[in-house]
C-alpha cells in the first residue's frame, strides 16, 4: 500500500515500440528501383508494446481503490525519447475477417527488431550514476501490493542495483509484495527464461511463495535442453510442459507458473496445490488456421494483465484466494475478441500524433465480463479445462496406454458414446479436444497425433523451397479393410487447403511394371499443371512375382524423385506418396513379415517419413475407444437427415437401434459395413430412426451377424439420460473439476 493507505500496483520492465508500415494497396508495386513518387503511399505509426502496453491495459482493469505506478514512457516521436525504446518493425495489412464483419488490420510481415542504441542507457548513458533514469518510477511506493515486470530479455534484467527497478524489489525487508514477471527468452548469449540479476533478486526464498511467472511455450522451446512438442495433441504438449516445469529447479517453486499457447490455451501450475491444469481450445491447437489471417502482438501481455487484475481483487479481499484460473480463461476469451477486431490504425500518441492502437478497450471489457460471469459460477463453451497428471502418477512403461482426456472423461461417464450420437460431440465431450480434418472428426489422442504429424510433415514439405529435382514425400497408412484409409488421407490433405489432385492406384490390379510407369507419368503431368499430386498406392504390399514384389520398384522414385522408362529418366516433381497396406493391418505386422528383408522392406521404410495405424470400427487389442469412434461416425451420418434432428440438434434414434450400432461385436467390412446399414435403412422421410427403419435381416447379414445385431436392438434400455438432466450433470461435474485457484 501507499503511505495514504491506498492499494498500489507497480509496473516496469523492457519497453518496445513497434513501428508499423500501413498501406491500403492490395498488392505491392513490385518495382524495387522505380521513382519514389510512383510507389504506393504508406504511413508509419508507432504501436506501444512491452511494459508500456502492459501498463495501459492494467490501467483499464484496476478496480476502485488501486493506483498504478509506472515510468513516464514519453512520446515516441520525440528525439530525446528515442533511445528509451527497443524497436520492432512490421507491415500491417487489411485482412478479410473470419466472420461477416469489416476488414481488420493485422501484421502481414515482420521485418525485425533493434535493441535500444545504448544498452539500457538513459538520459546520460556516459555517466553510470544517471543510467536508467528514463525508467525511474515517479512516486514509487516502498510497499506496493503487486509488482509487475515485463522481462523480454533485452536489457532490463541484466542491470545490477538499477535505480529503475521498483524500490520494493531492491529492498528485502518486511513482507514481499506479489510479483508477476512476464518472462521472455531474450536474445543472444544472455537468453533464457528467468536469467540475470533481476531473477536472482526476485527468486530469493522470501519471495518465491508470492512470485508468479508467465511465459510462452515458444520461449521455452528456445531452450535446447527442453523438449516441448507442437501441433501433435494437447495431451502431449501439456505433458511435455509439465516435464519442462519440473526440470526448472527454483522456477518450479514459485507460487504459480503459467505457460501461454497464444490465443488457444495456457497451462497453470499451482505450486501450493501441486496441480497442473490445462486451459485449451478444443478445436484448435497452436498455429491454428483460425489465427493465420495476420499476426498480432500483445497476447501474453493480455494474459499477464488479467492475472494482475485477479491479484488486485485478492489484495482487496485477502480472505478470497486469487482466481488465477478464472483470469486465464478470461484472458483467452479476450485475446480471441481482440484478434477478431484487429489493430486500430486511427489511434493517437500522447502528443496527438497518429498511432496504431492495440484493441485495449475490447480486451479489457472481455476480461471483466468473463471474470464476472465465472465468479458467479458460469462457464464458457469455447475452452476446456483439465487436470494434467504428474509423470510419477503415470506408468513409465512404453507399452502402457497413453493418458488422454478422452480416457479420463469416459471413465466417469459410461454413457458417453450414446450421448455423442443423440446430443452431439460438443455436449457429450465438453472437456475433450476435437480433431477436425475437413469431413473427418476424431477425439482419440492416438489418431489426432497421427493425423497432425502427417499434416505437419506435408505442410513443411509444401512450404520449403522447391529444388531442381525434388523427391516425393512418402507416408504409409495401415489398417484393416474398410477402416477408411483412403477417406482419412483425403480429409487430412483436404484440411491443408493445398491446390492438390488426389490420385488412387490399386497395385493389386496392375498387371506389370508398365502400368506403374504409366501411373508415374500421370503424377508427373499433374505436377506440371501446377497442382500437388497426392498418389494413393492402395495394396502396395500385394503380390507381384513374389511377396511384396512392388516394393522394390518404388525405391528409386522415392529416393531420387525420378523413374526410368527404357534408357530415359523422367523427374516426378513434388508429390505426396501414400502407401496403404492391404494385407498388413499395422506397421508392426508389415515389418514382421517373413519376407520383409528379402523384399527390400528396410530400404523402403528408410524412405518413409511418417505413418498412421487406423483402428477402424472394430475393437482391437487394448482398444478402449472403438465405441466412441462408432458413435462419431453414426452421428455424422445421421446429421445428413435433417428430419431426424430436432431444433436443438438432438437426434431421434431408438435406444435399441443405437445400442446395436454401438455394441455389435463386429462389422464385417469395417466402416463400409456400418455406413451401408445406415444407407440401406429407410430414413429419407423418417422423423425417427426406429426399428422399423432398419434393413431386412438378409441385408444386415452382409455386414454384421444379423442375430447379434437384432438381439441388441431388442434388449433393455440405454443408460443415457435425457438431454436436460444429462446437461445439468455435465455442468456440475465440470464445475467440480474447476476448483478456483
Image: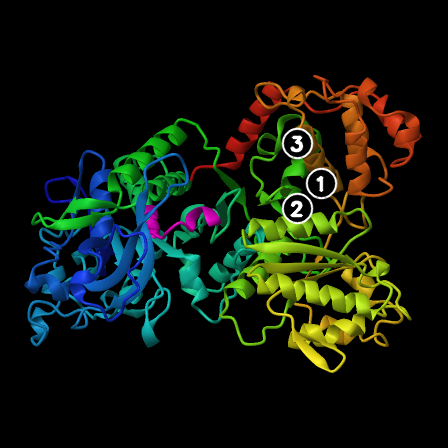
Q: Does the segment drawn in magenta span residue 295?
A: yes
Work out whether residue 156 or residue 430 is closer to the camera in this orientation and state it.
430
Residue holding disc 2: 444
Work out whether residue 371 or residue 231 is closer to the camera in this orientation and state it.
231
Q: Secondary structure at mark 1?
A: helix
Work out whether residue 157 or residue 649 is closer to the camera in this orientation and state it.
649
Residue holding disc 3: 420
Q: In percent of the image, x 42 and y 48: which residue is there? A: 291
The quarter holding residue 51 reads bottom left
Residue 233, compared with residue 661, is above or below; it is below
For marks 2 and 3, the one nearer the N-term is 3
Mark 3 neighbour class, 10 Å CA radius: few under 14, some 14 to 19, many 20 or more: many
Mark 1 neighbour class, 10 Å CA radius: few under 14, some 14 to 19, many 20 or more: many
- Quadrant where the image shows the C terminus: top left
For marks 2 and 1, the one nearer the N-term is 2
- In screen coordinates, is 17 left or right of 289? left
Q: Secondary structure at mark 3?
A: helix
Q: Does the segment drawn in magenta span residue 686?
A: no
- Quadrant where the image shows the N terminus: top left
Disc 3 + disc 1, Cβ < 8 Å:
no
The quarter holding residue 15 reads bottom left
For the residues labelled 2 and 1, the Cα–Cα distance comes to: 8 Å
Residue holding disc 1: 629
Q: In percent of the image, x 16 and y 57: which residue is there? A: 167
For the residues labelled 2 and 3, the Cα–Cα distance comes to: 14 Å
Q: In percent of the image, x 18 and y 54: which residue is there? A: 45
User: Where residue 190 sits in the image (x, y, percent)?
Assistant: 32, 73
User: Where residue 49 sits in the image (x, y, percent)?
Assistant: 24, 54
For marks 3 and 1, the one nearer the N-term is 3
Q: Which residues are magenta?
A: 289-303
Amino acid at each position: 500500500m501507499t503511505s495514504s493507505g491506498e492499494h498500489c500496483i507497480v509496473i516496469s520492465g523492457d519497453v518496445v515500440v513497434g513501428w508499423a508500415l500501413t498501406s491500403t494497396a492490395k498488392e505491392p508495386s513490385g518495382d524495387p528501383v522505380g521513382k519514389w513518387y510512383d510507389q504506393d503511399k504508406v504511413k508509419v505509426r508507432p504501436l506501444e508494446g512491452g511494459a508500456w502496453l502492459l501498463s495501459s491495459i492494467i490501467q483499464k482493469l484496476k478496480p476502485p481503490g488501486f493506483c498504478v505506478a509506472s515510468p513516464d514512457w514519453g512520446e515516441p516521436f520525440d528525439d530525446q525519447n528515442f533511445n528509451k525504446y527497443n524497436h520492432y518493425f512490421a507491415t500491417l495489412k487489411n485482412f478479410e475477417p473470419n466472420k461477416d464483419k469489416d476488414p481488420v488490420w493485422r501484421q502481414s510481415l515482420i521485418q525485425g527488431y533493434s535493441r535500444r542504441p545504448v544498452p539500457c542507457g538513459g538520459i546520460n548513458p556516459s555517466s553510470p550514476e544517471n543510467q536508467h533514469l528514463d525508467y525511474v518510477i515517479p512516486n514509487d511506493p516502498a510497499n506496493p501490493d503487486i509488482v509487475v515486470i515485463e522481462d523480454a530479455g533485452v536489457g532490463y534484467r541484466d542491470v545490477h542495483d538499477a535505480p529503475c527497478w521498483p524500490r520494493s524489489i531492491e529492498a528485502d525487508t518486511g513482507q514481499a509484495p506479489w510479483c508477476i514477471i512476464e518472462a521472455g527468452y531474450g536474445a543472444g548469449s544472455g537468453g533464457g527464461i528467468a536469467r540475470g540479476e533481476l531473477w536472482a533478486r526476485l527468486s530469493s526464498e522470501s519471495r518465491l511463495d508470492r512470485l508468479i511467472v508467465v511465459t510462452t511455450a515458444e520461449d521455452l522451446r528456445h531452450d535446447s535442453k527442453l523438449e516441448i512438442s507442437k501441433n501433435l495433441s494437447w495431451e502431449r504438449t501439456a505433458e511435455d510442459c509439465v516435464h519442462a516445469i519440473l526440470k526448472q529447479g527454483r522456477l518450479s517453486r514459485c507460487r504459480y507458473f503459467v505457460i501461454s499457447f497464444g490465443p488457444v490455451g495456457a497451462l497453470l501450475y499451482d505450486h501450493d496445490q501441486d496441480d497442473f491444469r490445462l486451459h485449451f481450445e478444443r478445436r484448435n491447437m497452436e498455429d491454428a488456421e483460425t489465427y493465420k489471417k495476420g499476426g498480432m502482438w500483445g497476447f501474453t501481455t493480455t494474459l499477464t494483465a488479467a492475472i494482475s487484475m485477479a491479484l488486485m481483487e485478492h489484495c482487496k479481499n485477502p480472505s478470497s484466494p486469487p482466481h488465477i484460473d478464472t483470469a486465464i480463461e478470461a484472458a483467452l476469451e479476450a485475446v480471441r475478441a481482440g484478434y477478431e477486431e484487429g489493430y486500430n490504425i486511427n489511434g493517437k500518441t500522447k502528443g496527438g500524433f497518429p498511432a496504431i492502437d492495440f484493441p485495449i478497450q475490447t480486451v479489457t471489457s472481455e476480461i471483466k465480463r468473463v471474470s464476472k460471469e465465472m465468479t458467479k459460477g458460469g462457464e464458457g463453451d469455447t475452452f476446456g479445462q483439465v487436470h494434467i497428471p504428474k509423470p510419477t502418477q503415470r506408468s513409465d512403461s512404453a507399452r502402457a496406454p497413453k493418458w488422454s482426456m478422452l480416457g479420463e472423461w469416459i471413465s466417469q461417464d459410461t454413457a458417453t458414446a450414446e450421448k455423442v450420437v443423440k446430443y452431439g460431440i460438443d455436449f457429450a465431450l465438453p472437456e475433450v479436444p476435437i480433431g477436425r480434418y475437413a469431413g473427418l472428426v476424431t477425439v482419440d489422442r492416438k489418431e489426432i497425433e497421427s493425423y497432425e504429424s502427417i499434416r505437419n510433415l506435408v505442410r513443411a514439405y509444401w512450404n520449403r523451397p522447391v529444388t531442381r529435382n525434388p523427391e516425393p514425400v512418402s507416408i504409409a497408412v495401415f489398417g484393416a479393410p474398410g477402416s477408411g484409409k483412403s477417406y482419412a488421407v483425403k480429409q487430412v490433405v483436404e484440411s491443408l487447403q493445398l491446390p492438390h489432385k488426389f490420385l488412387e492406384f490399386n497395385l493389386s490390379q496392375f498387371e506389370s511394371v508398365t502400368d506403374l510407369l504409366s501411373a508415374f507419368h500421370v503424377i508427373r503431368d499433374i505436377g506440371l499443371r501446377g497442382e500437388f499430386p497426392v498418389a494413393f498406392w492402395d495394396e502396395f504390399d500385394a503380390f507381384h512375382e513374389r511377396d511384396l514384389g512392388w516394393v522394390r520398384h518404388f525405391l528409386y522414385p522415392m529416393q531420387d524423385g525420378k523413374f526410368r522408362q527404357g534408357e530415359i529418366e523422367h523427374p516426378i516433381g513434388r508429390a505426396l506418396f501414400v502407401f496403404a497396406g492391404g494385407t498388413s493391418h499395422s506397421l508392426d505386422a508389415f515389418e514382421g513379415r517373413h519376407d520383409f528383408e528379402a523384399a527390400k522392406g528396410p530400404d523402403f521404410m528408410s524412405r518413409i517419413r511418417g505413418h498412421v495405424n487406423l483402428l477402424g470400427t472394430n475393437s482391437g487389442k487394448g482398444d478402449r475407444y472403438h465405441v466412441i469412434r462408432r458413435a462419431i461416425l453414426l452421428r455424422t451420418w445421421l446429421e445428413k437427415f435433417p428430419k431426424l434432428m430436432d431444433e436443438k440438434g438432438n437426434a431421434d434414434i431408438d435406444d435399441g437401434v443405437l445400442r446395436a450400432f454401438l455394441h455389435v461385436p463386429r462389422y464385417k467390412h469395417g466402416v463400409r459395413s456400418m455406413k451401408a446399414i445406415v444407407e440401406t435403412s429407410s430414413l429419407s422421410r423418417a422423423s425417427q430412426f426406429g426399428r422399423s427403419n432398419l434393413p431386412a435381416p438378409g441385408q444386415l447379414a452382409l455386414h454384421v451377424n444379423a442375430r447379434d445385431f437384432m438381439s441388441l436392438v431388442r434388449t433393455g434400455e440405454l443408460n443415457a439420460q435425457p438431454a436436460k438432466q444429462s446437461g445439468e450433470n455435465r455442468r456440475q461435474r465440470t464445475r467440480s473439476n474447476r476448483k478456483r485457484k
